[in-house]
């Protein structure tokens, strides 16, 4: 139970210190640290990252969602193809999905050219991959449950009954 | 023009001065806000917009839309074991505040005495006075964790009153009462034939035990007006939607006043509320979870700072003892020196002396920053500075 709670607080904000998590959950700091360590050791927690609104950064980043279709044979399964693709640093996420195509792959690079090159040089030639459809991201509105953009001001009265 | 005497004798709200002080400061973090920092769930807002698009802009039935009353009836039955007939025993109002006012205007005759458990929400006392009643303050005590007890009721002379007004989970103290604790209040009310107005607007925000409505205790349903609404649990304060639950003769009397003054509660808000009851349990649960975590944070930090605070268990308030004897001076200095606003307990009536209402209806980052500033303030000031 405490594991679930610690995770919930971290998922809200991973910047919460162990002390603050302990306060919020009415636990001991040591206990919280032990839970986090265990979650990390078990590989439940894979990392901590900042969620960015990239429109506010000067650097140009190109992201694309790529649909992939594959054919399997006796020697090659989804796992094999996935592990081959996922190792490329440019690949941000990779999911096996139901529906009209097999994999949904998100890639990120400095330019459209880079992305195109990656798809044509590294992805399309994989023998099991029969089709790629690349969708360049034009704008983003929400990331990992967080709305991007300026949000709204707190317009509540500063003191109210 | 000279206002009527009954209006003139009611002073402006005690929080006004602190509001003005807070407004003067830049970069203020307010722990003085009596409403959620969350916005109403998007589904409720979208339902309100859709109702407007469909042109639902006319009055509703005086008592509120039938489907909403039905949904309210089902919800309070499921959550609080309260059973009220949507046709005769549910009255939808413009905020819980209107319901409180209706209870006074429908049941208080000039000269009647109304016992008001204090510290309390700022509108009970003026409401009684506007209705021509006399207020019998019932100060609850820190040593009772600000719960209402038979002893404080008797000490205050509440046995002579016609009506008792109470609010648990409580604003401003964050106190809650268990079924067992309510038992002695109920017994007192039955013995002395008191009508009870039970403001349960914070019912969803009870962190350590299930909320119990006093109306569910033996012999209480027939003498209790339960008041609740959508402002706190659904973060819909500005939509102004509340309701009263009471036996038919009581809601009929209240509706008599309501139909001539309000006619019906805001229609758009009724659509939002209907959606809230239908689909927003998960959002409400998540808000409650967040409040609870903040509560724990605030109480832990107070303890670490050496600020004396009982374990508040409901609403979104903590009610610590001010580190200085003069809580108002402390609150004022806190605003001026570290830009943190909290409301002194005196603004909420008797029993609040020497305390501060600290609202944790503030985002976690601001809350942490405010607590850091408070700590810095406490660390750098003597316990009781010379005036």
Image (tube, helix red, strand yellow):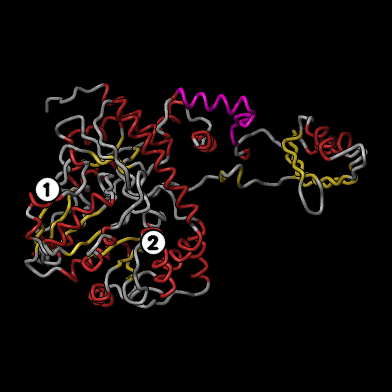
The chain letter under disc 1 is B
Q: Where is residue B199 in the image (x, y as percent from the top left)?
A: 27, 58
List x then y, in percent, for residue B368: 39, 32
Looking at the image, residue A81 lies above or below residue B38: above
Query: Closer to us: mark 1 or mark 2?
Result: 1
Report the magenta residues as a range: A30-51
Q: Which labelled disc corresponds to residue B171?
A: none
Residue at image point 52% right, 38% down: A8
Please provide percent x and percent y for residue B92.
34, 69
| Mark drawn on residue B151 | 1
B241 w.r.t. B207: above or below:
below
Q: State which chain disc 2 sits on.
A: B
Q: Secondary structure beneath disc 1? A: helix
Q: Quarter holding the C terminus of chain B?
A: top left
According to the image, label 2 marks what residue? B239
- Quarter of the image for residue B353 reads top left
Q: Quadrant of residue B231?
A: bottom left
């Amino acid at each position: 139970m405490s594991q679930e709670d610690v995770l919930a607080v971290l998922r809200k904000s991973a910047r919460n210190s162990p002390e603050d998590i302990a306060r919020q959950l009415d636990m001991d700091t040591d206990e919280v640290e032990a839970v986090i360590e265990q979650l990390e050791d078990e590989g439940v927690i894979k990392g901590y990252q900042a969620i960015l609104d990239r429109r506010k950064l000067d650097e140009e980043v190109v992201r694309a969602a790529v649909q992939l279709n594959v054919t399997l044979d006796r020697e090659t399964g989804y796992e094999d193809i996935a592990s081959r693709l996922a190792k490329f640093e440019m690949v941000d996420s990779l999911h096996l999905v139901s529906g009209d195509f097999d994999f949904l792959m998100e890639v990120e690079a400095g330019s459209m050219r880079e992305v195109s090159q990656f798809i044509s040089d590294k992805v399309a030639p994989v023998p099991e991959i029969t089709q790629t459809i690349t969708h360049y991201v034009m704008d983003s509105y929400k990331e990992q449950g967080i709305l991007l953009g300026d949000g709204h001001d707190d317009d509540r009265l500063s003191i109210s009954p | 023009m000279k206002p009527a005497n009954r209006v003139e004798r009611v002073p402006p709200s005690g929080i006004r001065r602190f509001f003005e002080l807070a407004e003067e400061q830049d970069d203020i973090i307010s722990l003085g806000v009596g409403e959620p920092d969350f916005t109403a769930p998007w589904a409720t807002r979208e339902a309100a917009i859709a109702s407007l698009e469909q042109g639902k802009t006319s009055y509703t039935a005086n008592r509120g839309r039938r489907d909403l009353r039905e949904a309210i009836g089902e919800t309070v039955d499921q959550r609080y074991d309260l059973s009220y007939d949507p046709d005769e025993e549910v009255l939808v109002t413009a905020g819980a505040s209107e319901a409180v006012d209706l209870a006074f205007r429908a049941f208080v005759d000039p000269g009647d005495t109304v016992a008001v458990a204090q510290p309390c929400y700022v509108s009970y006392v003026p409401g009684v006075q506007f209705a021509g009643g006399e207020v019998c303050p019932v100060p609850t005590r820190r040593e009772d964790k600000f719960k209402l007890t038979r002893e404080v009721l008797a000490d205050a002379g509440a046995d002579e009153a016609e009506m008792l007004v109470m609010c648990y989970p409580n604003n401003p103290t964050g106190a809650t009462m268990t079924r067992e604790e309510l038992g002695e209040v109920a017994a007192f009310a039955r013995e002395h034939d008191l009508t009870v107005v039970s403001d349960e607007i914070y019912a969803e925000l009870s962190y350590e035990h299930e909320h119990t409505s006093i109306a569910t205790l033996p012999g209480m349903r027939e003498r209790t007006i339960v008041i609740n609404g959508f402002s706190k649990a659904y973060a819909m304060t500005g939509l102004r939607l509340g309701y009263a639950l009471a036996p038919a003769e009581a809601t009929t009397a209240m509706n008599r006043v309501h139909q001539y003054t309000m006619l019906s509660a805001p229609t758009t808000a009724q659509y939002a509320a209907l959606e809230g009851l239908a689909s927003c349990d998960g959002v409400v649960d998540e808000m409650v979870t967040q409040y609870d975590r903040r509560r724990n944070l605030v109480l832990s930090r107070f303890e670490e700072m050496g600020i004396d605070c009982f374990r508040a268990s409901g609403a979104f308030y903590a009610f610590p003892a001010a580190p200085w004897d003069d809580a108002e001076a402390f609150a004022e200095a806190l605003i001026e020196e570290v830009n943190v606003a909290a409301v002194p307990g005196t603004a909420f009536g008797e029993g609040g002396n020497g305390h501060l209402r600290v609202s944790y209806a503030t985002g976690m980052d601001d809350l942490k920053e405010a607590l850091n500033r408070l700590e810095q303030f406490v660390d750098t000031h003597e316990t009781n500075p010379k005036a």
